[in-house]
Image (cartoon, helix red, strand yellow):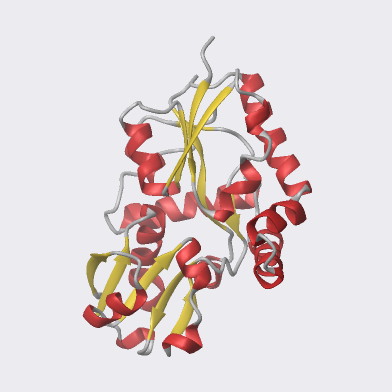
Amino acid sequence: MRALRLGAVSYLNTKPLVYGLDAHPHQFDVRFDVPAKCAELLHAGKVDLGLIPAIEYLRGEYAIVPDISIASDGEVATVAVFTRKQIGDVQSLALDLSSRTSVALTRVLCAKHWRISPKFTPAEPDLEAMLQKADAALVIGDPAFDIDPAKHRVTKIDLGAEWKALTGLPFVYAMWVGRPGAATAEQCRLLQQARDAGVAHLPEIARQVGGGNADLEQRSLRYLRDNLKYDLGDREQAGLRRFFELASDIGLAELKPLRWI
């Protein structure tokens, strides 16, 4: 049996989910890309399971590996809108397209929470360049993690916190998704065990990321430990369903039920 082809995300937030998978080369062949690319590879059949933006689950006939996600129950730190205006005054918003879920979440929050209808424009994740052509900018992942709002004279609006304020629920950014039957029960268990091992070794992961920089190490540890959740339990599933409902309500995708591998 050939190894399962996994398309994983190249950001810091993924590291606990892939911890130790390289010890199972006969089971898994892992490649790393930005979230949107992971989804493209899955849609094209070039990977068997993708750690894809949650909204992309609605773009095909897929099923989800149980009990694993990248989620937050409140502030997430790495998915944010940066603005020099009050959010209610924003008329144009530049979008980092690296994660389609973050783009969809921004659109949902604009429509359902902030009650604004800005013009959306795609952009590379360069904050100053984005703010030259728009009132506000969505930046996600490691680039958002590195932005100092004071240095750029912006307000950072954390989308995990905004979602919690709107719904009272966690937000699920990504999960392992594939076609029904893409993975065996054993492979799903190994992915769950990798998650458990990663969560148990967060200080080690942060130390590797820090590379001797104590401030970066501590900031990475706080992010992995305090901002992120890696389960897909009842509350996370409720948040995911609510996101799909609101995204469908504003015409971003067709609503589908959650299915499990």
- Judged from this view, the residue extending furthest toward the front is 212
Residue drawn 68% across the image and 28% down it = 23
Is 179 rendered above or below residue 78? above
Q: Nearer the viewer, residue 3 or 118?
A: 3
- Is residue 201 found left or right of 224 in the rendered image? right
Above or below, 115 relative to 144: below
Residue 159 horizontal/vertical position (percent): 48, 69
- Quadrant of residue 61 within the rendered picture: top left
x and y, in percent, of residue 106 in the image: 37, 66
In the displayed structure, 28 sits above or below 66; it is: above
Q: Quadrant of the C terminus?
A: top right
The residue located at (28%, 83%) in the rendering is 135
- Which quadrant holds residue 210? bottom right
Would you say 259 lies left or right of 27 here?
left
Question: Where's residue 117, x and y in %?
Answer: 25, 75
Q: Is residue 137 visible?
A: yes
Which quadrant holds residue 220? Answer: bottom right
Residue at position x 70%, y 66% from top? 222
Q: How many marks?
A: 0
Quadrant (top left/top right/bottom left/bottom right) for the N terminus = top right
Q: Is residue 233 visible?
A: no
Tell me residue 192's x, y (percent). Answer: 68, 35
Q: Is residue 182 left or right of residue 25?
A: left
Name the residue: 57% across, 55% down: 12
**Pick the front one: 113 or 147:** 147
Extreme residue in the top direction: 1
